[in-house]
Amino acid sequence: MIPCIVSAQTSDEQAIIQLLEKESATWRSGDIEAHAGCWAIKPYSRILISTLDGQVIDLPPQFMINPPEGVAGNGGTSSNSDYKIGINGNSAIVSHNEVSISPDGIKTYSYEIRMLEKINGSWKLIGQSIHQYEPEGS
């Protein structure tokens, strides 16, 4: 029999997951103030997105706290899964999968890497790398 090790989530891991779920939901709902509250833009912040057609978008980090009119809040939902979290003091790196579902039902799949820092006792996003993909069999 193969031993099974089950570890409970730490309070920091729970707080990080809650933050990432909030960040996804507030973007889609258009709650710019709550979405901005999930972020702490630093001089080293970076937002990189790889699209299905092979383009790389280097999005200005300020976009996350002050998006152009009409960009955020287009509705839809998302589902994050397969969280892998590494915490080292007040820094964390998280990978997860996301399925983003537009209001008209179109699904976009991505692998995401998120960088966070604990600032004044609260976890904040400081950067991310998003890589869109087509699931096998699509």
Image (cartoon, helix red, strand yellow):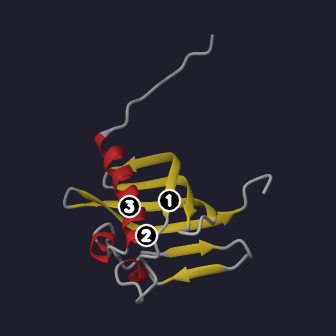
Q: Are marks 1 and 2 in contact (CB under 8 Å)?
A: yes
Question: Which amino acid is tagged 3?
Answer: Leu
Question: In the visual, does 133 lie left or right of 7?
Answer: right
Asked which secondary structure carries label 2, the reply is helix
Image position of 116 (left or right of 131): left
- Residue 42 x %, y %: 35, 76
Query: Which circle's residue, 2 or 3, is located before the other in the chain?
Result: 2
Say which residue label 1 marks: 78
Q: Quadrant of residue 52?
A: bottom right
**SS assignment at label 1:** strand
Amino acid on which the number 1 mark rests in the picture: Ser
Closer to the chain start, of discs 3 and 1, is: 1
Q: Residue at x 35, y 60 (%)?
A: 22
Which residue shows up at 56% across the image and 81% down it?
Answer: 58
Residue 43 x %, y %: 37, 79
Q: Which mark is residue 116?
A: 3
Q: CA distance from mark 2 to mark 3?
A: 21 Å
In-front residue for pair 79/37: 79
Q: Residue furthest top?
A: 1
Quadrant position of the N terminus in the picture:
top right
Residue placed under numbered mark 2 in the picture: 28
